[in-house]
Image: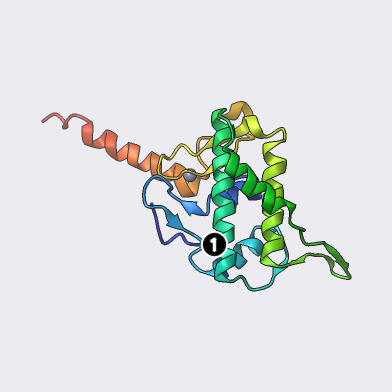
Amino acid sequence: MNLDSAIHVFVCGNPALDFAATLRARRTVRFEMFARPDRLSAWYVESGVVDAVSPAQEADVEQAKTVREAIYQLVTARRLGEDYDGSALTVVNNAARRPPAVPQLTPAGRWTQATPEEALSMVARHAVELLSGPDVPLLKECGNPECTRTYIDRSRGMRRQWCGMESCGNKIKAAAYRARRKTAPAAAH
Ligand SMILES: [Zn+2]
């Protein structure tokens, strides 16, 4: 896993899935993208969930991580066809119940200014919509076993194997190529 890739990326097809993927490589190194409050604030804006957010505090990060882990549990349960965990449901529903930020019309277009709590509510509402909507059968985990991102596979025949070619596809293909070279019989003299 390339740990210098600490920039936020949005490849999953839904903000709730991208949010769940901010704990990277869950089965191995568990790399935390919300290492500082400003990284959380940056995510809210870069994801397009809001246009601006008031500065997040440590408590906001803790709250966001709790909701994120609950979203991940619910998404994984849906993907595997398992029952929801009751406490994860409560965490996501409680976050979604908080008021979201209200978009305002300005001469320059729409502008949504949020507090971290309002932004988190909006992410939780995305999770509610996603998990009760038509994209559930399209949920897929990235084919790179280290990655643990879940994305919506909208490709024809659901053939998409990776969250992204750059992040995972090329890496896995290169590793497979090296493995084949290693096990290939030595060239004849
Ligand atoms: Zn991946």
Q: Is residue 101 visible?
A: yes
* Residue at which label 1 appears: 62
Q: Is residue 87 left or right of residue 115?
A: left
Residue 105, percent from left and from top: 88, 65
Residue 129, percent from left and from top: 72, 42
Q: Vertical placement of 55 versus 178: above or below? A: below
The quarter of the rendered structure image containing the C terminus is top left
Q: Is residue 12 left or right of residue 141?
A: right
Question: Which of the two residues, 24 or 180, is positioned nearer the viewer here?
Answer: 24
The image quarter in which residue 38 lies: bottom right
Residue 143, percent from left and from top: 46, 36
Question: Which of the two residues, 17 or 119, is positioned nearer the viewer here?
Answer: 119
Q: Vertical placement of 147 versus 180: above or below? A: below
Residue sitting at x 52%, y 54%: 22
Question: Which of the two residues, 55 or 189, is positioned nearer the viewer here?
Answer: 55
Extreme residue toward the left, this view: 189
Residue sitting at x 71%, y 69%: 52
Q: Give the amino acid type for the residue marked by disc 1 in the picture.
A: Glu
Q: Is residue 77 left or right of residue 154?
A: left
The image quarter in which residue 111 lies: bottom right
The image quarter in which residue 41 lies: bottom right
Q: Is residue 151 visible?
A: no
Looking at the rendered structure, the secondary structure element under dot 1 is helix
Q: Is mark 1 within 8 Å of ligand 1?
A: no
Extreme residue toward the bottom, this view: 55
Category of crowding for the residue at label 1, using alpha-carbon neighbours closer than 10 angstroms: few (below 14), some (14–19), many (at least 20): few
Q: Vertical placement of 38 versus 68: above or below? A: below
Q: How many discs appear?
A: 1
